Amino acid sequence: MKKVLVMILLVILVASVAFTAKITFWTTEVESNRLQRIRTLATLFKIKYGVEVEVVPVEENDLLRQIPIAKASGTLPDVVEAGIEPILLLGSEGLLAEKLATDIIDEFGDVYTGASRLLSNGKGGFYAVPFHAWVQGIWYRKDMFEAKGLDAPITWDNILKAAKELHDPDNGVYGIILPKKADAYAEQVFTEVALANGARPLDLNGNIMFNTPEMIEAFRFYKELGKYSKPGFTTVLDALKGYLSGEAPMIFYSTYIMDDIAVEEVQRGRINKFNPQLVENTGFANYMINTKPSSYGQVVALGILAGTKNRIEAKQFVKFLMTGSNYIYWLHMAPGGMNPTRKSVAADPKFLENPVLERYGSEKIQEIISALENIERFDFFEGHVLTDMSKISGAFIIGKAINYMFANDWTPEETAEWAQKEAEKILGK
């Protein structure tokens, strides 16, 4: 009798193992400490749903090379986590389950509009689900603004007025530290300026649009603002250190600055001193507007592969990662750099239970993250990937145009014309 029972138990055990569902999850978070967190979440998912998750780290730069190899060998993952560039390219090739992604966004009902808009398939749905994001805006000294009776630096007029009023170079204070070097940071800052005026380097038909009135006006504003910036061809590090030290009351920066502002050890590592009041005295202009509102940033998304046989389990896993304490556990890998794309999580007191985030408080955190409502980029427009934009960025055309505008004292028209011709040469048009 005992032998029979043992045999039955073995059959049940083997059967349960055989029929346990399994999904594969590719993640571009390849650092060991982050993978440890992700594997912990995979274990919790298995405990709750009985579904095993194989976590496979893939370098983001290697992702698009690995996808065709996996497709040919029949080993595509069920779920992939990556930045919007590879995600949208996968979607445009029909490799993502658009209906599942759209259903998840609809079911959540609280995903920030701008974040989901970047993943639009152009047909009323979405290629993937926006998972987390960082956003860029103007970080500014509220105490200095209030002392001068200045409004928040959101409109072009208010930004320029504040830069003029607060510019005091004789006392080592500059109205703003603006990027003027031919690098990616200059392009990021200029992106927000241009989009706030409805200007784009490319339209949906691939036409180059550097010499449009809207773009020329954006260059004009940037050059005017540069009059009140710290001299020299300033970089992202100049901006960061300048803000922390009080050298500038305004800078453009992403939410990755949050620990520099709030954490003594981090701030001292930058400037060798600490201002404990800086968090309270810091404001964040979470969008910019001239003719339209805009903010700049990056979104990381979760995409479900179209060919998966585990549609239900894949959908469960995406929702699991973006719900409650699971979501917060992931986001706390990089507080400030990884921000929730769901409003309810941004408002969750548990999200603030972190040494960086707790210094800001719920109201300020939600204000910062709400920049996701207006997030835009040059390389994505109305559900389309503008692939030529990567060539323009790779050649640093925008950064060079800005650098030459200041170095050669070019007019905005001369700057726009140089960028137009350079883009035409790069793109062969």
Image (tube, rainbow, N blue to C red):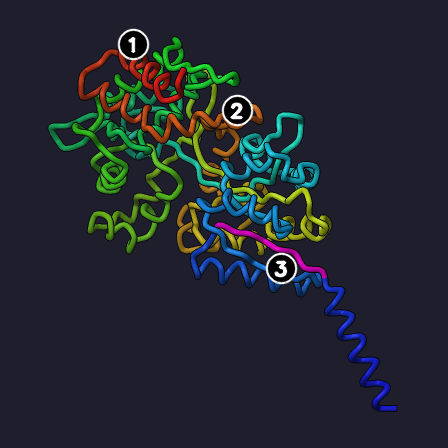
User: Against 208, is 360 above or below?
Assistant: below
Please tell me how crowded label 3 is: few (under 14), some (14-19), or many (20+) other residues with Cα within 10 Å. many
Please tell me how crowded label 1 is: few (under 14), some (14-19), or many (20+) other residues with Cα within 10 Å. some
For the record, the magenta segment spans 21-28
Residue visible at 52% across and 28% down? 385
Which residue occupies the foreground of this view, 352 or 195? 195
Tell me the distance, in whole angstroms, between the alpha carbons under discs 1 and 2.
Answer: 25 Å
The numbered dot on residue 413 is 1
Residue at the spot of label 2: 381
For this view, does 149 lie left or right of residue 348? Answer: left
User: Against 42, is 15 above or below?
Assistant: below
Residue visible at 61% across and 39% down? 128
Q: Earlier in the sequence, mark 1 or mark 2?
A: 2
Which residue occupies the foreground of this view, 131 or 84? 84
Specify the quadrant that holds the C terminus.
top left
For this view, does 57 lie left or right of residue 72? Answer: left
Residue at the spot of label 3: 53
Q: Position of residue 307 (x, y in %)?
A: 69, 45
Q: Are marks 1 and 3 in contact (CB under 8 Å)?
A: no
Q: Position of residue 68 (x, y in %)?
A: 56, 44
Three-letter residue code for mark 2: Phe
Q: Position of residue 268 (x, y in %)?
A: 24, 52
* Quadrant of the image occupied by residue 101: top right
* Quadrant of the image occupied by residue 46: bottom right
